[in-house]
Structure formats: structure tokens, C-alpha cells
Image (spheres, grey):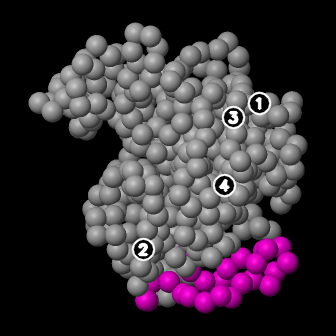
Amino acid sequence: MKTFNPWNSKATRWLWLVLVVLGLVIPCHALAVGSWRPLANFPSEGIGHMLLLSDGTVMAQGGGGVGVNWFRLTPDIHGSYVNGTWSALAPMNDTREYYSSDVLQDGRVFVAGGEYGSGYDKAEVYDPVANSWTSITVPAGLITTGTNVSTNPNSLGAHLAGFIDSLSVVLSNGKVLNTPVFPVTSGATVIFDPVSNTLSQGPSLPDYDADEQSSVKLPDDSILTFDWYQNGQRFIPSLNQWITDQNLPVQLFSATTEEVGAGFLLPDGRAFFLGGTGLTLYYTPTGNTNQGAWTQGPNLPGGLVAQDAPAAMMPNGKILCDFTIGSDHHTNYFYEFNPANGTFTQTSGPNSPLTDTNYVKSDATSMLDLPDGTVLYSDTSGRLYDYQPDTAPLASGKPVVASVTYNTDGSLHLSGTLFNGISQGASFGDDNQMDSNYPLVRFTDGSGYVY
């Protein structure tokens, strides 16, 4: 149940009410795959990481996803993001690239770490109403500190301390679970409490420290992940502890870059992971603390791999994927994966027939599920694109609104089911979280104006 107050007047009763979760109301096309459209307007800087705020606007990091500047994309009066406009937001306190990021239940945004930049051992919170960033104190004993960086010429000076590119997810109680790459205590995790704005030590992982891990939130609210050593593990919120799960039958981490791809909860209740080795895995959960079962899925086509590359679950149940060739992440191939039959179908690139030839590493690209059912894509080149699915949304993914009533103050009270959609939305791998699994309400008046 949610209470919304879009206006302080009951005059809005004549509006048509449409509940939109991850864009579950979209037009259809007769194509086998979706299609790309360039955005009409662009910000003054190249865009990297993107997040969907609770008011339906997009918060996007400038500087190609490296700097402190942020921008807001606001859809036009008809709800179009393609024709939306950009405005500047307050800058972050620290530079950061490849880091934890979560939209909190109160609408604020939590970020922590950064493989590159000054924020590798720091955290902060953005308030979209006040348009301001607040630094969060990191107590001693949670993460390692120091300014050491890797001397590996391929690492570009990656930090060897702090949170850096850690896994992060909002739990059902509103707190954030973070798995620092360099905790003080081996295997330890960190919990952020958005009520007190404090960080504290969380339950430890059963095996090894986290690094480059991907995760999926399962239907029972447990968090499924795995490590380089093919150990499966799950966090059980009700017990506030990690448990050992079934080992993976094949290796998903690439041997050269130690990277893995995105993970998703599928409409049939299984989890699906894209591998940096070109392999994929399904996971069937038990719904309790008993171990689930891993089974091998279809190989990625053409010898392609998913190594720190974005992907996005669409309302029709298919997954838009960005793949590359081996450890060369600079030519991006785009496919749709259909979980219903386990097939990959190649689609066009955003600015060329089949590939993105801007020579931008897939690591720097980003996808984001939008409320109109499309996927926003950025390759940091300064241009952004919108991907429109070709088929109707899954009936099983549509929210069911049981009742809509007005409160005495003019706000609306909605009750129903599936308001949070099927999956967490878009995914990347270990960092750059951009979950959008929360309700948005869209009002459309008789003239087609969207609020």
C-alpha cells in the first residue's frame, strides 16, 4: 500500500490514473526486436551512471561517469524522455567511478566507494528535494583506508583500499547491504541505516571477501550472489545472516579480467546470470534456507562475453544485453535474450547497424529502465539513446490495483499487488547499481498531459 499526494486538491479526480511499474504500459510494434531512438537533447557533459528517482526523473552522472557533476533528465509534458530536457544538479563531494549506488525508500540516493576517484573510502547521500549532498561518516574498523593504488598498467590506478566497486542492495526493511572489497575484517559487510544516516558492520560472508560480484534479489527477499571460487551464497534478511548455497557448476568470472555480467530475476521465478566467460547460469530458488539448484543456460552467441557490461529487463520479459569480444570491451554488440525459449536475437546498435562503434568500453556504458517501458542507454560519448521494446508487456508483470480512494487531505490511497514489478530492473554486475523496483504513479489528463 502507498499513499501519494501529487496535488493538494481533489480537482485531480478527473484525471485518468495509470499505475506504471517499470514501464508496464507501452505501445507495440511488429518488429522481431526493439528499436533505438536518439534523445533530442543532451547535457553539457558526457553521461555515465544513471538512476531513476522516485519522481520519474533521471539522475545522471556527468564527466563521462567519473566527475562530481550530476544532471537531471525531466520528461516533457507528454511523458516523453526522448524529448525531455536536462538541468544541472548539485555536485557530489567526491569523484567516484564504479561504485555502490541505491535509491532509498525515502527517495534519497546513497553512494559509497569508487574504484577510481577520491571517494573510494567515503559515502554520501543525495537529497533530491533539497538538491544537496551530505557526507556519511565511515566509522573506523569497517573498511581499510590508505591511498595505495594498483601498479598494474591495465588497472589505471585502481584503489587497493575502501569500498571501491562493491555490491550494494536495498533490503526490504529499507537498509542498504554493502559488501566492501577491502573490509577490515575478512568477509565483513556494511549496513547503511537511512533513518539514522549511519554505517555499521553487517554479517560476514561465509567464504571470502567480496570482489566483482553480481547479485539478484529473489522472491523471498534473500540476496543471491557468488564469488570467484564458484561458491554460491545468500543473505537471509529475516535471519540477518549469510548462508552457504550450492556451488556453481561452471565458472562465470573471466580468467583475464576477473569480471562477470549482470543478473536478473526472471518472470518464472528463477535467477539468470550472464558470464564473463560467455557462459550463463540459471538458479532455481527453494523459497527458504535450503540450497537452490544451478543449471547451465545457453552460451552467449558468437563467442561474445559479458564482462562489466549493462543489461536491462524489459516489460515484455526479454533482456536487452550489451556484449563484447573477449577482454576487448570496445566494440559492443546488442542482443535481446528471451527467457521463454532461452534464445539470443541480435538487434541493431544505437548508432550503427549491429554494433556501437564509438570505441567506448562496455564498462563505462549504462542502461536504465524508464517508467514508459523503454530503456535509456549512454555510452559516455555525449549522446544518449532510448530503446523501445517491440512487444506488449507480460500480463503476469502488470500490477493489480484493488482500490483507489481519496484521503481527506486530497492524497490518494492505493492498494493492490505487484507494485514493485518482477525484477530489480537494469543491472551491470558488481557495481553501478540502478535498481528501479518501486512504484510510480502516472496521471494522464484528457489532453494527453502526463504528471
Q: Is residue 147 magenta?
A: yes
Q: Which mark is residue 166?
A: none
Alpha carbon separation for disc pair 2 and 4: 22 Å
Circle 1 packing at 10 Å, graded few (<14), some (14-19), many (20+), is many
Q: Point out the tag, 1 or 2, that comes first from the N-terminus.
A: 2
The residue wearing badge 4 is 62
Please provide percent x and percent y for residue 421.
42, 36
Q: Circle 1 sits on which residue?
A: 347
Q: Amino acid at mark 4?
A: Gly
Image quadrant in which you'd find residue 368: top right
* Amino acid beneath label 3: Asn
Residue 439: x percent and y percent? 37, 37
Q: Which residue is mark 2?
A: 136
- Label 3, label 1: how far apart the Cα atoms are: 24 Å
Residue flagged by tag 1: what amino acid is it? Thr
Query: Position of 183 compared to 8: left or right?
Result: right
CB atoms of marks 3 and 1 within 8 Å: no
Please name the predominant secondary structure of the magenta segment in the image.
loop
Q: Nearer the viewer, mark 3 or mark 1?
A: 3
Magenta residues span: 140-168
Q: Assess whether mark 4 and mark 3 are in contact (beta carbons under 8 angstroms).
A: no
Q: Considering the numbered disc 4 on the image, is that residue within a helix, a strand or a loop?
A: loop
Check whether the beta carbons of the residues at disc 1 and disc 2 lie within 8 A of each other: no
